[in-house]
Image (spheres, grey):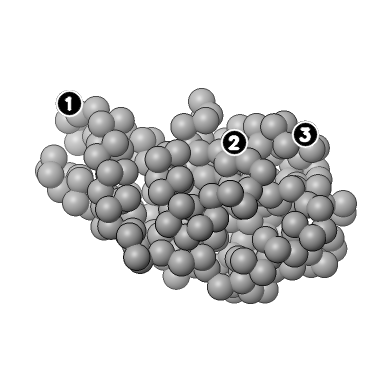
Amino acid sequence: MMVAAVLFDLDGVLVDSEPVSREASDRVLAEVGIVQTDEERKRVFGRRTVDNYRDAIKARGLDLDPSELVRRKNILFAELIRGRLQPLPGVLDLLAELKDAGVKVAVVSSSSMDRVNASLEEVGLILEFDLILSGDCCVKGKPDPEPFLLAAERLGVRPGECIVLEDAEAGILAAKAAGMKVIAVRSPNTHGQDLSGADLVVESMQDVNVRMMSRL
């Protein structure tokens, strides 16, 4: 296939920020008396934090504002990541290869823009992308295809010319529903995720290159 754009998820694909995010989330939720169940933890991956918090609040019949909890989490997250984040192995080489090949690159994350910007700034990647979309940019988040379709539209490419790099089932479902090819990257932090819907599954970002993508 002709690859015009590569759309990257953030957590578990570009950076390993999931443990820090979980720490921040657990602390903020604990302040309002919420301890997530194992099943709730499994469902959070790839989805917007505000949607996860809304579900947790509703399940417990609480009167809380999920957006306010997200705001508090983002502030804590930005404090906790200082000195703790690095681009995942293979990311910098792949970005350089895509740039040399004239392929557009975008971040399409379910996280809020504050959290996306904090992570990308911490690892020095915020200026490396043609487009950055967060969960704040869409009416519906992953697994709905809206985020990926919006990215293709803003980049001026057809969905069928896009390849998505994801590590969560929700993101894979969203990308496939958008008519895009998906490479799933295994992550130790997104345990229990069904990656079978991807066109290809790799063990690390170090396994991904332009030649592989063109064969999908």
User: What residue sits right under mark 1 in the picture?
Assistant: 63
Image-quadrant location for residue 156: top right
What is the distance, in whole Å, between disc 3 and disc 2 at their CAs?
Answer: 14 Å
Relative to the observer, which residue lies in front, 207 or 41? 207
| Nearer-the-camera pick, 81 or 196 | 81
Please, what secondary structure does the residue beneath circle 3 have? loop
Question: In this figure, which residue is indicated by the disc labeled 3?
Answer: 156
- Could you tell me if residue 126 is visible in this image? yes
Residue 196 visible here = no
Callout 1 amino acid: Asp
Give the spatial CA distance, label 3 vs label 1: 42 Å
Residue 23 in the image, given as x and y percentages of width and height: 26, 57
Q: Nearer the viewer, residue 50 or 198?
A: 50
> Residue at the spot x=63%, y=48% of the render?
129
Looking at the rendered structure, the kind of residue marked 3 is Gly
What residue lies at 24% left-to-right and 40% top-to-bottom? Answer: 72
Q: Nearer the viewer, mark 1 or mark 2?
A: 2
Q: Relative to 154, say whether 126 is above or below.
A: below
Whole-Å distance between the Cαs marked 1 and 2?
29 Å
Residue 211 picture location, percent across and down = 82, 67
Q: Secondary structure at mark 2?
A: helix
- Indicate the position of residue 83 as horizontal and vertical percent values: 34, 65
**Residue bearing mark 2:** 147
Looking at the rendered image, the disc whose residue lies closer to the viewer, 3 or 2, is 3
Q: Residues within 10 Å of mark 2 (few under 14, many from 20)?
A: many
The answer to whether the residue labelled 3 contacts the one labelled 1, judged by CB atoms less than 8 Å apart, is no
